[in-house]
Image (cartoon, rainbow, N blue to C red):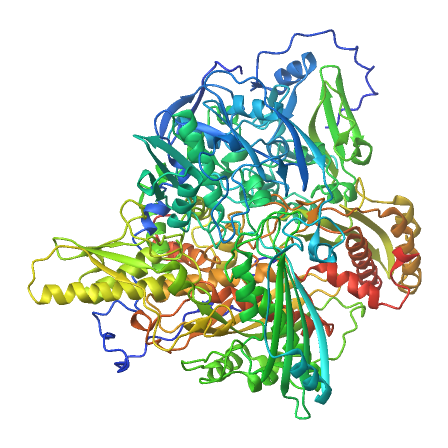
Amino acid sequence: MRERTAHAPRPEPRAYQPPSLARAYQPRSLAEALRIRGREAVIPFAGGTDLMVQRRRPTGLTPRFELPALFIGGLEELRGISEGDGVLTMGACCTCSRVLEERAAPPALRRVVEEIGSPAVKNRATMGGNICNASPAGDTLPALYALESRVVLRSERGGRTLPIEEFILGPGKTALAEDELLVAVEIPTAWPGRLFYRKIGTRRANALSKLSFLGMASNRRGRLVEARMAFGAVAPTVVRSRRIESGLRDAAAAELAERTPEVLELYAALIKPIDDQRSTAHYRKEAALRLLRFFLQRLAADL
Amino acid sequence: MNAEAPIRFRLNGREVSASGDPLRRLLDVLREDFGLTGVKEGCGEGECGACAVLIDGRLVNSCLVPVGDVEGRSVLTVEGFRETDRYRAIAAAMEETGAVQCGFCTPGFVMAAEALLRKNPDPSVEEIREALSGNLCRCTGYHAIVYAVRKAAETGKDLW
Amino acid sequence: MSQPDATAPKKPPLHRRNTPPDPQVVVDGRCPGLYILWGMGSLIRRSIPRDDARPKSGGFAEYVADLHPLGMLYARTLRSARPRARIASVRVPELPPGCFVVDRSDVPGVNRVKMLVDDQPFLAEGEVNYVGEPILLLVGPDREQLDRLLSAVVVEYEDRQPIFGVRDSLSGKKEPIYGTDNLFASYVFGASEAEMDRAFREASLVQQDEYESGYQEHIYMEPQGMVGVYEGGRVTVYGSMQCPYYVKNALVQGFGWEEGRIRVVQTTTGGAFGGKEEYPSLIAGHAAFAAVKCGRPVQLLLDRQEDIVSTTKRHPAVVRFRTALDGQARITAMQVDVTLDGGAYAGLSDVVLQRALFAATGVYRVPLARVSGRACATSSVPTGAFRGFGGPQAFFAVEMHMHHLALAVGEDPLDFKRRHAVSKGDATVTGGVYRQDVKLAEMADTLEALSGYREKKRGSAPRDEQAGDDAPLRGIGVSLFFHGAGFTGSGEKDKIKARVELLPLEEGGAEILVSNVEMGQGSQTTLRKIVAETLQVPVEAVVYRNPDTDRVPDSGPTVASRTVMIVGKLLMEAAEELRARREAGKADSSPVFKSYRQPEGVEWNQESFRGDAYQAYSWGANAVEVEVDPLTCEIRVCGIWGVYDIGRAIDERIIQGQIEGGIAQGLGYGSLEHMALRNGRIAQDSVTDYIIPTSLDVPPMEYRLVDNPYAEGPYGAKGAGELPLVGAAPALAAAVQDALGRPIRRIPVTPEDLMAEAARADNGARSAHER
């Protein structure tokens, strides 16, 4: 069941609080977690596989946490998966392993989760963590964007739901308010049937993404009903364009083939990767466009 | 949790408590407070698997887990595992296939093998590779280790 | 990433072990002391369980990070953040009681790490020459406190113009880092320029090529570390290392003490691969000076990131060829020039260069060869030993050059290479002789049969990668290579002068006292087998502990694939003497010593670079099959085949381990392990970003050993540890070329490079980003 609220009024600037003596909190319920979150500045900590690396210090030293950690990874209320009303709701602290064990998980999500990290990382890394970390290379994100996911946020003031593309604002930046927690991800259970996904990692396993491409499509009677395309790690946030996608609706094979170069150009303008220690901007862009072209060619061939 | 409150958990079958900063890495607590040096730091980034332990039966990299997060949970390290028949089957297989060279990665692989065989007592070679993909080895080239896990599964038929 | 597929046909076995041992009895008449006993009793070749397997798998084995002597303090190193600078000032915050700073003024003796050239300080003296260079240590009881203090140290640098890359180093445009010309070493030998010029004039075809190879980092799973203890006027350093006497000698020089006051003990070492050959001397000094200053034991452990950034790496190389062929497509002359990037200090670059030069013409007969090279100084991390030690760089280059020559004359590369391969009696590039049987022809045959090379190769037609089909492009490539076993040149005779000791034990066994270490490669099994076999006692009766310089003589470093061949041979001789003594009924429990003697006929002249650079060669042949994804240029290695001549295996399973592990490292060197500098600092400074293979990256491996016992080696054994790494990368590069029909001149072969070349070659309008 979805909670729908208008945006709650902006929280009052927090009155000065003495620094907490606590280094971490282990709340026993979501309500308790929200209470703590509402009262003081804390770092929400689900699986920690990103936080513990980002904050790591040299051997033998405790990672750097300038604020108390709020351990929410064990909260049962955040680990459930349920379905109803055309929506699959996944608790924010569902681990990757949990998602892979869940039959109802959409194939697109399953595919991207399969290629996250290692078995040990999958046992700790969570959906919510991957979303809130908002890395341009976040593995789940292209699937969540393409699946039209919404994030469910809660605070003591109430709850709100946002489309994922409105939640992730930039590298490491989200619309999460200081007193909010991301509690669940909602995924509409209707999605196009054909799936194409490629993650290009630095090696065959346990690899960070250099870039990824996820395409979904459905067709009927020789015409494209819908195509969705999302690119990861080639821009500050996931690249997805409903405008370009809607332009392809109803296309037949010949038209799709004819318009492929134009579609490539449109996406080329949106794909703005960088050079870094893992790969180059040139490679990321070239490979992304080649994967896109291949996807479109396959689509046309299927029609 | 403040720096004083003890963190209670099960370690290798015993109830224990850790004190101090709940954000200390479980890796450091295990090695330094409990002397469990079979758990090793190879990278500190959750990439190499040398620090792998089982928490509630699941394989995790202890360098990425704050000790406060294991409150109420059950932790198994190689020291707790090595007195079991399952361990003996794995160790015997590793000895037979030449899976141990410098040995630094080995306890991590032992735990990863146990985590796999618990879930899947008869894994294919592909499944073994996948299950071990989070453990790095620089000495062996992996085949001897993969073979060892396959051998342990075969010879230890009733153990898992 | 591969997915488990229940419907796929059952795959063939992952790797096939070499064929069972030949049951023939072979006695080599040239070496009366050599017995080979077949049947159930012989230990040689037969795989036995390693004693260290169970202690390691159960987590019992103690590595340096597990040592916590009472009262131990921790040390952290302040390292340069600049590639090249004068240190104008260092302001250390006020230290709480119990904390110490250790800097160059705390080096009692010579502040230089003993090496070939003593140019590297233990702790910086007013200048720094690479990012990561140690400046000082902070030592204290509390690591959190130490970390805070370290962050509070303020260094004022006056930046100087750094030099990056060999071209910059040789340009002469910037103030040199080393000497007047930035050359740590430089050599030229072989034919004269006049002879070469004539050969080029008379040639039917002259081809020039240039090849580049990059850094490689060892990523031993155990980061480096030392514990220094000062007690009773003596310093003891415990740590992860390959060469206890290198460390001891460095400490003797650093302290200026008489050597009885210095003791070095190797701790169980979690991998090394050359990365713990010279670097440990530096950090052992740190731990020792700190222990003496503080009066307490001091632990110095490198964090993984610190280890990647600051410790030695494989030398990047640029190798150029100019080769003349006659009308029958035979090589008549070859000119090779090698440039190595030595980083900021001389280190072992001189010897790495020599080994690269001695491998410069590969396994080939080259009537006229002129070889030159240099190791130059740059403002980056000093490069050093890494399995192969100059060989991998040279063999990548010469194997690809031979491949390109073959294509130029329209011949299959393997055929071209075979035609030029040396045989017994042929001259080496330094005018020495290949004195033992060279089985390359037989090995190439076996390789072809195993790999299906003929059926699989594509030829040289360029591919159309933009065909829109995602079917992978397959290719196969081969390499032929050697590794000179033992120290280069006259090193064994003139520098190392190995000495071993065998101590009889009452119960009938013996204790091995050598300075060579077990670092995973199995020496604590193989050397014990050699002694046990010779004494005719069970292996359990032979003891071989981690070396302690108080107890062991200097049998030399654990490098250069010398441990079994040189040290094992000496131990065999010692065991023969001990056995003879026992058989004669002598009740003598005094130790037996043996010292190295160069084999008859092996002569080397270091001044003229003439003669036998090595007393023996081990040989290899590899074939690698790859698939290249035409969309993404990702490379997947489908299989690797190998045939190796390492004389005889002392223990077959241990040899398998060296082959499989060496192949994995060689394939990584060829494709995954990309490392580059950014402003003089290594950009891939974590195990996340410096990519080594996982269990899903290694291909099926199939290999054979050829039987070619080496008379001077113990039970026929030759060096084996480095050889398997050498051939993998060239075969991989050749396979990618075969798949794509485009020349590969650089390793690691990355998808980024392939894509960039494809875009350059692409004259179509498909690359949208160009608009």
Please determine whether, in this image, residue C55 is positioned above or below residue A177: below
Residue B58 as seen in the image, left or right of residue C342: left
Please determine whether, in this image, residue C20 is positioned above or below residue C166: below
Report the residue at 65% width, 54% height from top. Answer: C182
**Residue C374 screen position, x and y as percent:** 62, 62
Please determine whether, in this image, residue C381 is positioned above or below residue C107: below
- Label count reads 0
**Residue C387 screen position, x and y as percent:** 50, 59
Q: Residue furthest bottom?
A: C327
Relative depth, front residue between B147 and C221: C221
| Residue C1 can be seen in this image | no
Relative depth, front residue between A74 and B112: B112
In the figure, residue A103 lies in which quadrant? top right
Relative depth, front residue between A137 and C77: C77
Report the residue at 47% width, 40% height from top. Answer: C110
In the figure, residue C20 lies in which quadrant? bottom left
Report the residue at 78% width, 41% height from top. Answer: A145
Residue C528 as seen in the image, left or right of residue C630: left
**Residue C160 screen position, x and y as percent:** 72, 40
| Residue C231 can be seen in this image | yes
**Residue C229 screen position, x and y as percent:** 36, 32
Relative depth, front residue between C658 and C374: C374
